[in-house]
Amino acid sequence: MKFGVIGAGQMGGGIAQVAAQSGFDVIVQDVEQEYLDRGRGVIEKSLTKLQEKGKLSDAPAEVLARIKFTTHMQDFADCDLVVEAIVENQAVKNALFEQLGQIVKPSGILASNTSSIPITALASASGRPDRFIGMHFMNPVPLMALVEVIRGYATSDETAQFVTQTAEQMGKTPLTCNDFPGFVSNRILMPMLNEAIQCVMEGVAEPEAIDGIMKLGMNHPMGPLTLADFIGLDTCLSIMEVLHTGLGDDKYRPSPLLRKMVQAGLLGRKSGEGFYKY
Ligand code: CAA
Ligand code: NAD
């Protein structure tokens, strides 16, 4: 299987890594060589960590050798599956899928790792809506078991079956849902993170206390503010905007503090500062 990944950020890098760990031939594309180099470095570190813990069957170098890095989208022409993991912005993703739909061989399946953007709209942009699907990995990809599989309006049974089987071959548990704003995962998770941010804004408690209360009180592995920083505050804001627009209810309104922090360039872990400093 030839497995394409677009975007070498935290999600694209993780997806490429796990695909290569599963024995697939992987090709990863990003817009600049420096982003590819950074992604490669993150993958190398993760593979080393997994090897130290005895959780890797092949040597890190062998896994890395299965990943090709490129800045050219034409290199996806003979891919059987391409998973897109670029910025959470519908206009940018639409433009990318319009292009990709003309490059990848007709039998190739296109998937988006979007957190919330309508799969049906991206499928239309791709020009091959029956061979289009949401393949939503969770962060950090090498450690998280779930792949949320989102069927668009025209996704064929064959496409859904292929992607489900591929997720299983990658050692993940696929669970399927239909195409509604935020799907299942972020429709439920993101309002909780947004509410935690609202608590900071209203002075209900300090960030450390909010996270501590949710970690110790609800047995969550990370507090909601730590998790928001980990996901990326820009991504959190985009998801809340999709929920707010798509579902209409004001309970999904993004917290003004979240908006302000993104405007200030405080994006969480990836920018070095969010609710905490990194
Ligand atoms: N690759 C390899 N190893 C990794 C890694 C990676 N990518 N990321 C972390 N690790 C390692 C850590 O370095 C650490 O190693 P040591 O034991 O040697 O220190 C080890 O994994 C375990 O980490 P921790 O001890 O810090 O924490 P943990 O055992 O509790 O597990 C975790 C870490 C799995 C990330 C856990 O904190 C967790 O489940 N957090 C919540 C994650 C979550 O909710 N993800 C979903 C986000 S939402 C989403 O993804 C959808 C969306 O659209 C936004
Ligand atoms: P990120 O900012 O870490 O990485 C995005 C990468 O895409 C960057 O390297 C960027 O250079 C690249 N990129 C941007 N435009 C591109 C283009 N036109 N062509 C090729 N590459 C391009 O973002 P991320 O956190 O990895 O998120 C990526 C996607 O995955 C988003 O849709 C996000 O909603 C989704 N997602 C994120 C998480 C999370 O926790 N961060 C979890 C699940 C899904």
Image (spheres, rainbow, N blue to C red):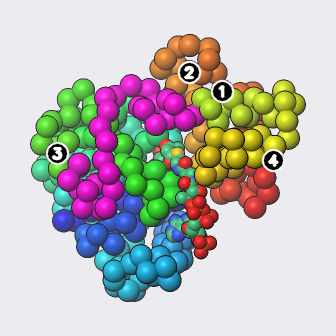
Instruction: Compare marks 1 and 4 and give the one earlier in the sequence.
Output: 4
- Give the residue number, with chain letter if any, for mark 4: 208
- Give the residue number, with chain letter if any, for mark 1: 254
* Amino acid type indicated by mark 2: His
From the viewer's perspective, tell me whether residue 26 is left or right of residue 197.
left
Disc 2 residue lies near ligand 2 with CB under 8 A: no
Image marks 1 and 4: residues in contact by CB distance under 8 Å = no
Image marks 4 and 3: residues in contact by CB distance under 8 Å = no
- Give the residue number, with chain letter if any, for mark 2: 244
Instruction: Compare marks 4 and 3 and give the one earlier in the sequence.
Output: 3
| Mark 1 crowdedness (10 Å alpha carbons): few <14, some 14-19, many ≥20 | many
Q: Which residues are magenta?
A: 163-190
Of the 4 image quadrants, the one containing the N terminus is bottom left
From the viewer's perspective, tell me whether residue 263 is left or right of residue 48.
right
Image marks 2 and 1: residues in contact by CB distance under 8 Å = yes
Of the 4 image quadrants, the one containing the C terminus is bottom right
Q: CA distance from mark 2 to mark 1?
A: 8 Å
Instruction: Compare marks 3 and 1 and give the one earlier in the sequence.
Output: 3
Query: Residue 26: which quarter of the image?
Result: bottom left
Q: Mark 2, mark 3: which one is toward the viewer? A: 3
Residue 77, placed above or below residue 38: above
Q: Is residue 164 magenta?
A: yes
- Give the residue number, with chain letter if any, for mark 3: 161
| Mark 3 crowdedness (10 Å alpha carbons): few <14, some 14-19, many ≥20 | few
Q: Mark 4, mark 2: which one is toward the viewer? A: 4
Residue 29: x percent and y percent? 40, 62
Tell me if I can see residue 90 in this picture.
Answer: no
